[in-house]
Image (cartoon, rainbow, N blue to C red):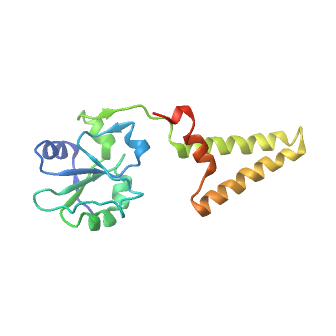
Amino acid sequence: MLPLLSPADAFQKLREGKIRLVDIREPDEVISVRVPGAEVVPLSVIKWAPLPPADEKLPIVFTCHSGKRTSAQSDQLEKLAAGPAWQLDGGVSAWARAGLPVERGHQAMPIFRQIQIGAGSLVLLGLAGVFFWPPMIWLTALVGAGLVFAGLTGFCGFGLLLSAMPWNKK
């Protein structure tokens, strides 16, 4: 388990160049709030990312939004650090609450939540539509099949469609 480092201590060490801060959140999360100087290496690709190993002069401090993901993946992150490493206590949200410097940007609602809202709405529409036109039940079946397909293959056509929408563009 990675030991905890407070946001204030991490800020001081980062400012002095004594640590590397590695943010493991996904890019759509980093867009909304980011710690200046943090390296972004999403947890979804960290196994394959070229993460230079930590050493005594420059240990790594891993962070996520609240500290839960970092804590849950602590053993894996410790192995990947290949040297001295900590986790930021409370994550980026604790850093921001402490009044430490952050960069803020515009973030659309995360794609995964948009997919949940869209798929759920289509299912409800299909079920309500059955009362007016019975073949509407197929809309519900199609959405269910699409979700199962996305879960099995990792390909989500609805997600690709939503990511191309204007509100998801920079």
Task: Say whether residue 139 is left or right of residue 60.
Answer: right
Q: Position of residue 47 (x, y in %)?
A: 36, 64
Quadrant the C terminus occupies: top left
Identify the residue at image location x=56%, y=39%: 164
Quadrant the N terminus occupies: bottom left
Identify the residue at image location x=49%, y=35%: 169
Of residues 120 and 39, the one drawn nearer to the viewer in this rendering: 39
Q: Position of residue 95 (x, y in %)?
A: 27, 40
Q: Quadrant of residue 120?
A: top right
Location of residue 8 with respect to 147 vertically, above or below: above
Identify the residue at image location x=59%, y=41%: 162
Q: Position of residue 102 (x, y in %)?
A: 28, 35
Of residues 87 and 119, the one drawn nearer to the viewer in this rendering: 119
Identify the residue at image location x=21%, y=47%: 6
Q: Position of residue 81 (x, y in %)?
A: 24, 63
Of residues 147 and 7, the one drawn nearer to the viewer in this rendering: 147
Task: Say whether residue 48 is left or right of residue 159.
Answer: left
Of residues 113 and 99, the one drawn nearer to the viewer in this rendering: 113
Q: Quadrant of residue 70?
A: bottom left
Q: Quadrant of residue 11?
A: top left
Task: Say whether residue 19 is left or right of residue 22.
Answer: left
